[in-house]
Image (tube, rainbow, N blue to C red):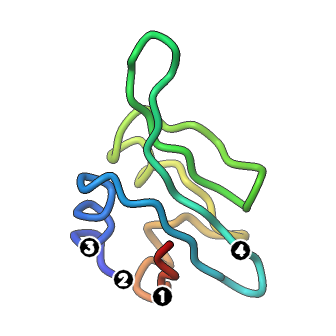
Amino acid sequence: MTKDELFFLLESRREFEFSYKDTLYSIMCEKDFSGKEYIKFGKLYFEEKFDSFNDLYARAEVGNSYLREVIEEIQINRK
């Protein structure tokens, strides 16, 4: 996957999963009670909230690496 593909999937409000080193991760867009949108990302059932795509891309971790460092190795499983 590329950074642009990830951006497109999130802008399209797509929910998806991927495996990396035998760990399943999920990414989805959601809204809180006030209507503010955020991105939920992380190990399945242990996701973290990110305020924006840039926040996700800067801080999200996959294993012992940042998402931005391993994004080219990721193959998504669309729901």
Q: How far apart are marks 3 and 4 (CA)?
A: 19 Å
Count of number-bearing discs: 4
Q: Is mark 1 on a helix, strand or loop?
A: loop
45 shown above or below 37 = below
What kind of residue is marked 1?
Gln
What kind of residue is marked 3?
Glu
Label 2 sits on residue: 1
Q: Distance between the residues labelled 1 and 3?
A: 11 Å
- Taking the spot 51% from the left edge, 14% from the top edge, the residue there is 33
Residue nearest the observer in this picture, 61 or 41: 41
What kind of residue is marked 4?
Leu
Question: Would you say the residues marked 1 and 3 are in contact, meaning their CB atoms lie under 8 Å apart?
Answer: no
Label 4 neighbourhood size at 10 Å, few (<14), some (14-19), many (20+)? some
Question: Would you say the residues marked 2 and 1 are in contact, meaning their CB atoms lie under 8 Å apart?
Answer: yes
Q: How far apart are marks 4 and 1 (CA)?
A: 11 Å
- Taking the spot 51% from the left edge, 66% from the top edge, the residue there is 67
First of labels 4, 2 by sequence position: 2
Left or right of 54 on screen, residue 55: right
Question: Would you say the residues marked 3 and 2 are in contact, meaning their CB atoms lie under 8 Å apart?
Answer: yes
77 shown above or below 43 = below
Label 3 neighbourhood size at 10 Å, few (<14), some (14-19), many (20+)? few
Q: What element carries label 4?
A: strand
First of labels 1, 3 by sequence position: 3
Which mark identifies residue 75?
Answer: 1
Label 4 sits on residue: 24
- Taking the spot 38% from the left edge, 29% from the top edge, the residue there is 37
Residue nearest the observer in this picture, 33 or 6: 33
Tell me where residue 40 sits by quadrant. top right
Question: Would you say the residues marked 3 and 4 are in contact, meaning their CB atoms lie under 8 Å apart?
Answer: no
Viewer-side label of 4, 2: 4
First of labels 4, 1 by sequence position: 4
